[in-house]
Image (tube, rainbow, N blue to C red):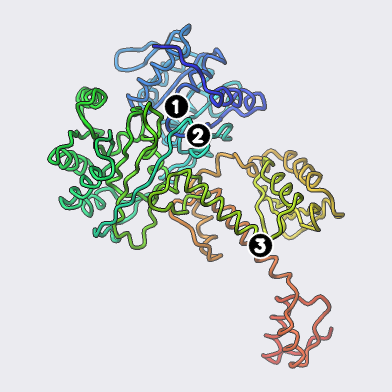
Amino acid sequence: MAAIKPRPYQLEAVQAVVDAYRRGITRQLLSLPTGSGKTVIFSMLARHVQRKTLVIAHRDELLEQAYQKLRAVYPEARIGIVKGRTQELWADVVVCGVQTAAKRLEALKQYRFDLMVIDEAHHSAANSYRKVISGLGFADDRAKLLVGVTATAYRADRRGLGEIFQKITYERTILSMIREGYLCDARGVSVKTQFDISNVRTEHGDFKVNDLALAIDLPERNELVVDSYKEQTPGARGVCFCANVEHAQHMADAFSAAGVPAAAIWGSMGMEARKRTLRAFADGRYQVLTNCAVLTEGFDEPSISSVVLARPTKSRSLYVQMVGRGLRIHPGKRECIVLDFGDNCGRHDLCNLGSLLSDDDHLRKARDGETVKETAERIEREEDEALRGQIQITDVSMQVVSLFKADPHNWLPSGKDYVLEAGAMRLMALWQGEGAYTLKMVRGRSEEMLISEPAPLAEVLAAAERVVTALPSASRIARKDSAWRYDPATAGQRRKMDQLKIQYSDDVTSGQASAMITQKEVEIERKKKEPATDAQLRYLRALGITAPEHCTKVMAGYLIGRGRSGAGRYAG
């Protein structure tokens, strides 16, 4: 295998892990898109740290990829496998399936592993991973280093990665990778259908697969999918994602009947049969591979330029994994066409190409025919125009935006002020005029002005940094890159959003929920302090009530209610 030349961001990722470990962060998560070379990154990391290393994953394809990449990137090391009767535990780097590791935990304990890498780490909250992590000491031994790599730092089953990892220490977005030329752009084409999925039930944030299959695995719809592929991407090498095994088989039959060589692949298919099918596709004997929940991970075929989403999804994680199969760069490949099918979805909120932009943007809808870059550029233009329509852009206001953006903590805008949640305390940077702020700390019902005189924003942020970093638990909560932000929203957060009448999607993350709750609570508190309106003051005078000095809307409303009920007069 030819030597692999690392990309600049891969070197940055390794250095970020090393730097974070020196700061005491021993359970780290790396989040990079499909096609970015995550396997290369953890192979480089193993070579850099020169420690006894265990690499675990949940699929044979991932283990094989890891084994081959490790041999290419770290040729001087002994690379071993633990599988079946093969137990090469003596190796410098051991590659092992998670189920095998859980069963052979006592054998693994005989060797001191100082570095553990989890591939496709969004699965790592499962019990099998937890058993291995704790059993080998990676949950609490601060001399050891646990690193997870994933393209989707969130789970559909609502079990949190924040319980496993302390922090996301390196992250790249799909959009940044496309803009820098490391991934190809994707263009979305939506095909409208007359089929109804509005009554399909939801489970773990996405459709129940068998219910979905009953609604969409229909001969007429399958033919429409094939016809759309032939019309939009004739001759393209493609991968088609289906609801269940039968749907994948029926779609392969439909492609073949239309003259497009195709084969189906699924999880319970025999390993040798699966390898033969994948080799036949790589050799060009098949033009399209249909599958059910197999090719979302561990499938590396850069020549794919058509992704056919024969199944809709509400899960951003699954959507990103499916579309990611077509984003690798390849000679002569300008972009990947993503075909999705607009069934009548009723109350369901479906993912589309706009879901690739970011967590915050996942509900924004890409327009039909737009690429990811075009969607992002349009949204940026629209936001810029809206901003220019609201305020006059000045050097000072742009500097304020830049300072908050560069700060490691998750400051949220609230009118002209900014607010930061840090566990039991809330910090508020209160706008006092262009470029000048004060700083207030709120704990429960108590408030304290930390900076009472207007000061430059940089000074206010530095003071906030000192307060937050003095309390490690507060800092973990406040940081933008904390792993908990990517976990599904908790039941408590959902109840709070319902109570505050905040609209949210099924797959809302804990970070998104926290931001929406904070902004809503601050807005409510601010409204409580707004001065009474002229209409309220006139009504109080008509009732013969003297309003107190600095009367607020809330106070006026209370006095008006008392006045109407004849409960007495307020003497100001």
Q: Nearer the viewer, residue 145 or 390?
A: 390
Horizontal and vertical percent for residue 373? 48, 43
Can the viewer see residue 210 in this picture? yes
Question: Callout 2, which amino acid?
Answer: Met
Can the viewer see residue 205 in this picture? no
For label 2, the residue is 177
Q: Residue furthest right?
A: 453
Left or right of 45 on screen, residue 429: right
- Mark 3 to mark 2: distance in Å? 32 Å
Left or right of 349 on screen, residue 269: left
Given contact means CB atoms under 8 Å apart, are the residues at marks 1 and 2 in contact?
Answer: no
- Mark 1 to mark 2: distance in Å? 33 Å
Left or right of 562 on screen, residue 227: left
Question: Callout 3, which amino acid?
Answer: Gln
- Mark 1 to mark 3: distance in Å? 54 Å
For label 3, the residue is 390
The mark nearer the N terminus, 3 or 2, is: 2
Horizontal and vertical percent for residue 77? 47, 8
Q: Alpha-carbon neighbours of circle 2 within 10 Å: few (<14), some, or many (≥20)?
A: some
SS state under label 3? helix
The mark nearer the N terminus, 1 or 3, is: 1
Horizontal and vertical percent for residue 40? 47, 21
Q: Alpha-carbon neighbours of circle 1 within 10 Å: few (<14), some, or many (≥20)?
A: many
For label 1, the residue is 132
